[in-house]
Amino acid sequence: MPSGVAERRTGTRNGPCARAVLVTVAAYIFLGLESSGHGETEAVVSNPAHKEVVMTRASGTFEVKLSPQAADDKADASLGRMSIDKQFHGDPEGTSKGEMLSASTSVKGSAGYVAIERVDGKLLGRLGTFALQHCGIMTRGVPQLTITVVPDSGTDQLVGLAGKMTINIVDGKHFYDFEYTLAQPD
């Protein structure tokens, strides 16, 4: 490999500038994806072996703070770690805290991240916590994001929660759509 290419890669992957690019790319994947519409709908899902569950689609807004975390002195500069602090407004209503790991590449617009966040709040008037797992990929500027409720992570009145979330940003404001099932209380 020509030395100029190796130097260019080294310059791109190391130092504070590389971390800023990594944080920016991870934040874009984490925050800037399209979703379809807003509103709330329900559909009853029948399962003879279990209680009746209701498929619900809810939406709302959120604020998020991503804070880069200190890296190990020996860590690869193309890898990053951030803390997540969110405030949800709508359904669910509450807060979340989590951690994000990200990786950048030498190809502009290509990166990936994974994250776990614990949501603490109210959903359909029911209190509890649940975990969301994120998997985000950007391939040369084209983002893909999957956010799923971690199976069996619901606590208290949210036991049995399952679902997925999408994120959309319109004019700098963050929106989410949440499609989920939750067993009806006895």
Image: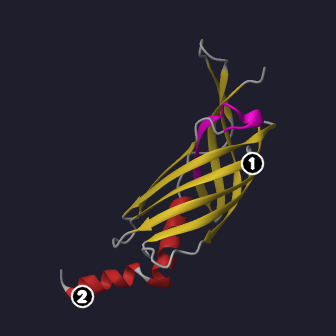
In the figure, is residue 118 to the left or right of 112? right
**Front residue (pair 85, 37):** 85
Q: Is residue 2 above or below residue 91?
A: below
- Image location of residue 136, percent across then percent down: 47, 55
The alpha-carbon separation of the residues under discs 2 and 1 comes to 50 Å
Horizontal and vertical percent position of residue 43: 64, 25
Q: Quadrant of residue 3?
A: bottom left
Q: Residue at x 67, y 29 (%)?
A: 42
Pointer 2 local density, CA inside 10 Å: few below 14, some 14–19, many at least 20: few
Seen in the image, is 104 located left or right of residue 130? left
Q: Amino acid at mark 1?
A: Asp
Q: Which residues are magenta?
A: 154-167
What residue is at 67 percent from the left and 26 percent from the top?
54
Disc 2 is placed on an element classified as: helix
Q: Which residue matches tag 2?
A: 4
Residue 1 place in picture, x, y as percent: 18, 80
Q: Is residue 155 in the magenta section?
A: yes
Location of the C terminus (image quadrant): top right
Q: Which mark is residue 39?
A: none
Which labelled disc corresponds to residue 120? 1
Q: SS of the residue at dot 1? A: strand
Q: Is residue 147 above or below residue 124?
A: below
